[in-house]
Image (tube, rainbow, N blue to C red):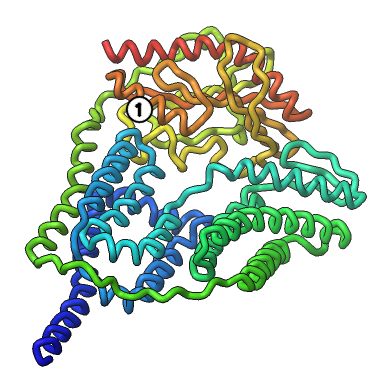
């Protein structure tokens, strides 16, 4: 009996000590991961500070810390025992981060960093502890700044939904893309009206609520689907109510601060109503008894596992440094000889000027075509690294935000001389601009950010480097976006083939 009592006390003390020890080894592994990919971590922090749609990043860390803290009573009864399956996951996620850095896809690297952090917990603490904390750790994925790519789609949906609701309310509407006119005034759906902030916030809050409220995956999935649909509907209602209030009050209400306040009131009511209804189907909190099996790993084994977990991400990061090894002196000699015969005109002060700060060389000029100005912009890239890559959140077609974004679509293409392009329509003080833009990656073209990265990876694997370019052609019209598009399309039909030949010549000449 005395021996059993002593063994019980020793066992209890070992288990209590293993909780603190587990925390220490996890923090060591996390520190190594964050330090190895510190450039990407800095980009995440910058996004939290500069992008309104991702201001909740710091809240994510607080929520994860609280959820992990709430698990401490359960974790005190678990042992730390390194897992080879966790190390396998750490190696694979590190490989994913390496690929993302190799082709300069920040989102892939940042998601991989979070997955490495989760895998490191699994690797150094073992299967049982990892199973207990997987839920809270999952929310770290929401710290990654993603989702901005769908903003144009959300803006289009908001404009269309608002116009449909206005017409059903008996208000006559003339719509042109994201701009529409009603008898009391002109409206435009800008980036702040797209609802991306509502959507990302709702998905995060909804995920936390579903995790804390339900244990059945069916209920969690259903609530998460509602957390996606609800902010979209709420944003459409917000846009419609604002326009109707302004219309009914001769534009005395619904503008300025009341515009913003009304939006958050509608969103807040929608969120709390969803919580109130969802809570009616709450699942009982399950009892988690400590596992009765497992052995605490000896200190040398645990520290060795920790050092190995810290070395793996650092090793993958060093592989990237070796494979990239850019030559900063290798500046492409870009010459658009196919446009040399066109007369160049004066660029208007308020013309659209794309901003691609990481390009190695930029060609930006205004040509006179059929008696009208046409702007041609080419940003050429080589030896791309983070911050100086073709696909980057800092790259913008219209950086001043002084032009209203009216349309974003894939225009019809009946010419074999023109690859698939993307049309962006803008309007400013009665002048409409139509921008045809696409990416060129070592002889291949695409309008997709994702596809361009795949093409870049394939080009690197084939030993052809990572030469790539962004091409934008802009024409203007005082009549409509369609009139401007017709002029842009005519210029593209006549000259894009030559521009593509110039880009190919630039790449091949420098490779010789």
Residue ID at (32%, 56%): 118
Residue 48 % position (x, y): 44, 57
Q: Residues within 10 Å of mark 1 (few under 14, many from 20)?
A: some
Q: Residue furthest bottom?
A: 2
Residue occupying the point 67% across, 20% down: 412
Q: In this rendered view, identify the residue nearer to me: 423 or 331.
A: 423
Residue found 60% across the figure and 16% down from its top: 492
Q: Quadrant of the C terminus?
A: top left
Say left or right for 266 vs 395.
Answer: right
Q: Residue 344's x, y, as percent?
A: 56, 16
Residue 407 is drawn in which quadrant?
A: top right
- The N terminus is located in which quarter? bottom left
* Residue in the picture at 30% in, 19% down: 462
- Where on the picture, by quarter, is residue 467? top left
Residue sitting farthest toward the right? 170
Say if 370 sits above or below 393 in the image. Answer: above
Which residue was labeled with disc 1?
A: 457
Q: In this orientation, which residue lies closer to the viewer: 277 or 404?
A: 277
Q: Is residue 210 left or right of residue 304?
A: right
Q: In the rendered image of this protein, does residue 122 appear above or below residue 101? A: below
In the rendered image, the residue lying farthest to the left is 300
């Amino acid at each position: 009996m005395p021996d059993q009592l002593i063994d019980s006390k020793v066992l209890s003390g070992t288990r209590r000590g293993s909780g603190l020890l587990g925390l220490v080894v996890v923090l060591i592994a996390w520190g190594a991961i964050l330090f190895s990919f510190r450039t990407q971590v800095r980009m995440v922090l910058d996004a939290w500070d500069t992008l309104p749609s991702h201001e909740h990043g710091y809240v994510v860390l607080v929520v994860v810390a609280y959820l992990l803290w709430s698990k401490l009573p359960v974790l005190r009864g678990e042992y730390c025992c390194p897992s080879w399956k966790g190390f396998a996951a750490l190696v694979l996620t590190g490989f994913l981060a390496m690929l993302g850095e190799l082709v300069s896809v920040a989102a892939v690297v940042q998601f991989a960093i979070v997955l490495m952090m989760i895998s490191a917990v699994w690797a150094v603490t073992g299967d049982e502890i990892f199973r207990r904390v997987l839920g809270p750790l999952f929310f770290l994925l929401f710290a990654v700044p993603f989702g901005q790519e769908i903003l144009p789609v959300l803006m289009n949906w908001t404009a269309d939904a608002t116009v449909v609701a206005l017409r059903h309310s008996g208000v006559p509407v003339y719509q042109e893309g994201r701009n529409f006119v009603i008898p009391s005034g002109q409206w435009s759906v800008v980036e702040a009206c797209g609802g991306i902030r509502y959507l990302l916030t709702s998905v995060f809050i909804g995920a936390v609520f579903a995790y804390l409220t339900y244990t059945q995956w069916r209920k969690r999935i259903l609530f998460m689907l509602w957390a996606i649909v609800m902010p979209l509907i709420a944003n459409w209602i917000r846009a419609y109510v604002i326009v109707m209030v302004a219309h009914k009050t001769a534009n005395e209400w619904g503008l300025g601060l009341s515009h913003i306040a009304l939006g958050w009131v509608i969103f807040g009511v929608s969120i709390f109503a969803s919580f109130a209804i969802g809570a009616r189907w709450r699942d009982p909190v399950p009892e988690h008894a400590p596992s009765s099996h497992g052995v605490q790993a000896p200190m040398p084994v645990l520290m060795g596992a920790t050092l190995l977990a810290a070395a793996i991400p650092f090793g993958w990061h060093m592989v990237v440094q070796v494979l990239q090894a850019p030559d900063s002196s290798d500046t492409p000699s870009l010459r658009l000889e196919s446009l040399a015969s066109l007369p160049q005109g004066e660029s208007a002060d308020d013309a659209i000027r794309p901003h691609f700060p990481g390009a190695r060389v930029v060609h930006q000029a205004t040509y006179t075509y059929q008696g009208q100005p046409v702007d041609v912009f080419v940003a050429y890239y080589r030896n791309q690294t983070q911050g100086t890559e073709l696909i980057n959140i800092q790259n913008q077609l219209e950086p001043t935000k002084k032009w209203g974004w009216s349309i974003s679509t894939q225009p019809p293409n009946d010419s074999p001389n023109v690859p698939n392009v993307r049309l962006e329509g803008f309007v400013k003080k009665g002048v409409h601009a139509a921008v045809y833009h696409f990416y060129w990656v070592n002889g291949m073209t695409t309008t997709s950010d994702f596809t361009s990265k795949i093409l870049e990876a394939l080009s690197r694997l084939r030993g052809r480097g990572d030469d790539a370019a962004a091409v934008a052609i802009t024409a203007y019209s005082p009549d409509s976006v369609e009139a401007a598009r017709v002029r842009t399309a005519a210029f593209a039909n006549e000259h894009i083939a030559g521009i593509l030949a110039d880009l190919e010549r630039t790449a091949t000449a420098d490779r010789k």
